[in-house]
Image (tube, rainbow, N blue to C red):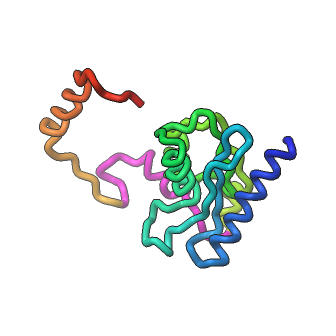
Amino acid sequence: MTKDHEFFMRRAIEMAAKGMNSNAGGPFGAVVVKDGEIIAEGHNKVTSTNDPTAHAEMVVIRDACNKLNTFQLTDCIIYTSCEPCPMCFGAIYWARPKAVYYGCDKADAKAIDFDDQFIYDELEVEMQDRQIHFKQMLQGEAVEVFNNWASKQDKTKY
């Protein structure tokens, strides 16, 4: 691992400490780097913003995409103080960075009561048996919009 990787990971860890010490949210931080430069940095803001999606990775992905005026981070690297949760994992894949480096892993997070295993488990459960009630309705009407998207000539693919 190069010194640059260590530098950026330390910055993600610093952001985790900053967020935790300011009581913004949990002890998680992240940075997005492009061409050796930090494009976005941030920390968890779940409790300070009342936003359950304001995880560090989500915060920096949104900020980086806004600054770069794009919805994909294909030339970027994300450094995060902890292995991403399922939501952040999904967002990272949608953002398409070329790499992700992380500090703590999910076992470390579980040790301080941030355990995401129940979400992974729910993905394997039949829809009708999940802990949160899901009920499909108006599929025919909803699929019309999908069909219109499929034939739309001026769409931006992603």
Residue visible at 86% across and 46% down in the picture:
3
In which quadrant will I find the N terminus?
top right
Residue interval drawn in magenta = 112-131
Instruction: Between residue 94 and residue 130, name the one nearer to us.
Output: 94
Residue visible at 73% across and 64% down in the picture:
14
Q: Is residue 114 visible?
A: yes
Q: Is residue 120 visible?
A: no
Query: Residue 153 at what x, y percent from top left?
Result: 26, 21
Query: Residue 7 at what x, y percent from top left?
Result: 81, 52
Instruction: Between residue 153 and residue 120, name the one nearer to us.
Output: 153
Q: Is residue 36 left or right of residue 41?
A: right
Q: Is residue 141 left or right of residue 101?
A: left
Which image quadrant for residue 26? bottom right
Q: Is residue 12 magenta?
A: no
Query: Residue 39 at what x, y percent from top left?
Result: 63, 48
Instruction: Between residue 158 and residue 130, name the one nearer to us.
Output: 158
Residue visible at 56% across and 74% down in the picture:
24
